[in-house]
């Protein structure tokens, strides 16, 4: 597999590789492994939330109503 980076990103990668004494390929491998793990965890969490909504275990919250409540709480705290 071949990966292309912007010059600035490649420069930062080379600098980090030089400072750490590790090859750039190892740094990229570690970064991608961490990213893919995090992405998998987020996907699992979102799937679970979706299942909760579809099954009715959790009721959706109106976004405008939620923000209005937060604004009101913030206004009350500033007033006191």
Image (cartoon, grey):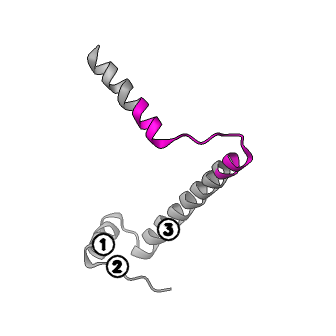
Tell me which secondary structure the magenta stretch mostly adopts: helix
Q: Nearer the viewer, residue 75 or 38?
A: 75
Q: Which residue is mark 1?
A: 9
Sequence-wise, the earlier of marks 2 and 3 is 2
Q: Residue at x 38, y 24 (%)?
A: 73
The residue carrying pointer 3 sits among few (fewer than 14), some (14 to 19) or many (20 or more) residues within 10 Å by Cα, namely few
- Give how far across and how far down residue 19 sits, in percent: 30, 65
Q: Is residue 17 left or right of residue 11?
A: right
Q: Quadrant of the C terminus?
A: top left
- Find numbered disc 2 in the image and state the secondary structure of the residue it sits on: loop
When the figure is inspected, residue 13 is found, relative to residue 75, above or below; the finding is below
- Give how far across and how far down residue 20 sits, in percent: 35, 64
Label 2 close to label 3 by CB (< 8 Å):
no
Q: Which residue is mark 3?
A: 32
Q: Residue at x 32, y 66 (%)?
A: 16
Q: Residue at x 36, y 68 (%)?
A: 21
| Magenta highlight on residue 62 | yes
- Give how far across and how far down residue 15 sits, in percent: 28, 69
Q: Which mark is residue 80?
A: none
The residue carrying pointer 2 sits among few (fewer than 14), some (14 to 19) or many (20 or more) residues within 10 Å by Cα, namely few
- The range drawn in magenta is 50-69
Count numbered badges in the picture: 3
Q: Which mark is residue 5?
A: 2
Label 2 close to label 1 by CB (< 8 Å):
yes
Q: Residue at x 28, y 69 (%)?
A: 12
Q: CA distance from mark 3 to mark 1?
A: 15 Å
The residue carrying pointer 1 sits among few (fewer than 14), some (14 to 19) or many (20 or more) residues within 10 Å by Cα, namely few
- Find numbered disc 3 in the image and state the secondary structure of the residue it sits on: helix
Sequence-wise, the earlier of marks 3 and 1 is 1
């Amino acid at each position: 597999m071949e990966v292309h980076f912007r010059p600035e990103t490649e420069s930062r990668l080379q600098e980090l590789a030089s400072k750490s004494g590790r090859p750039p390929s190892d740094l990229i491998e570690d970064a991608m492994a961490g990213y893919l793990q995090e992405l998998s965890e987020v996907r699992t969490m979102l799937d679970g939330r979706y299942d909760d909504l579809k099954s009715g275990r959790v009721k959706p919250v109106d976004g405008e109503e939620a923000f209005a409540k937060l604004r009101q709480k913030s206004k009350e705290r500033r007033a006191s």
